Amino acid sequence: MTPLVAEVMLASPIVLDGSATVDEVRTVFASSHVHMVLLTSSGHVGEPLLGTLVREDLLGPEGARGAVLPHARLAGRTVGADLLADDVRRSMQAAGQRRAAVVDGDGLLLGLLCLKHHGGGFCTDAGVASRRAARRSDADQTKAVSRAPRT
């Protein structure tokens, strides 16, 4: 049987509180691995989703300041947790999307649906955690090498 969106979503997406600033979100987007930022009232899954942001939402002047919420949107960026994952995958591919916020019937944020680059499946929490750990390890090794005494 085809899994539901709730079964293949990332349960720990990047969520900021609704009072986040443009600069704060740009800092999060400094990582090339972050493609969508989600906004809720206090920055937690399980709260009403206030908006979603992708880099293109912040293409205005680099000096833009202030609240980021006016730049966020929901339309076309959310999917229901109870939908069939394969149906949503096909729809996302047709629309050229790789990320969608997962919400329940009341609009509460449950997670993030992340389509893999090749389009054949979905990102997993374990895979994301593994890549984060590898990046931290690489960064730690780089720091250690740069601190090594020169002879």
Image (cartoon, rainbow, N blue to C red):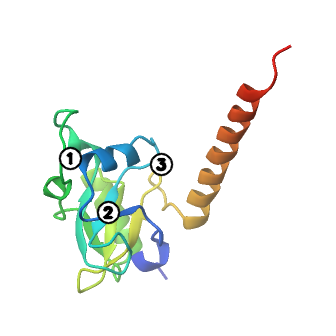
**x then y, percent, for residue 13:** 43, 65
Which amino acid type is shown beneath numbered disc 1?
Answer: Asp
Residue at (41%, 61%) from the top-left corner? 14
Above/below status of 82 relative to 78: below
- Residue underneath mark 3: 118
Query: Pointers 3 and 2 in contact (CB under 8 A)?
Result: no
Disc marking residue 38: 2
The residue type indicated by label 3 comes to His
Task: Give 69 or 128, whichever is nearer the viewer.
Answer: 69
Q: Residues within 10 Å of mark 1 (few under 14, many from 20)?
A: few
Q: Is residue 4 visible?
A: no
Mark 1 vs 2, N-terminal side: 2
Image quadrant of residue 83?
Answer: bottom left
Near-viewer residue (114 or 141): 141
| Side of 34 where 126 appears, left or right | right
Q: Which residue is mark 1?
A: 57
Residue at (16%, 64%) from the top-left corner? 75
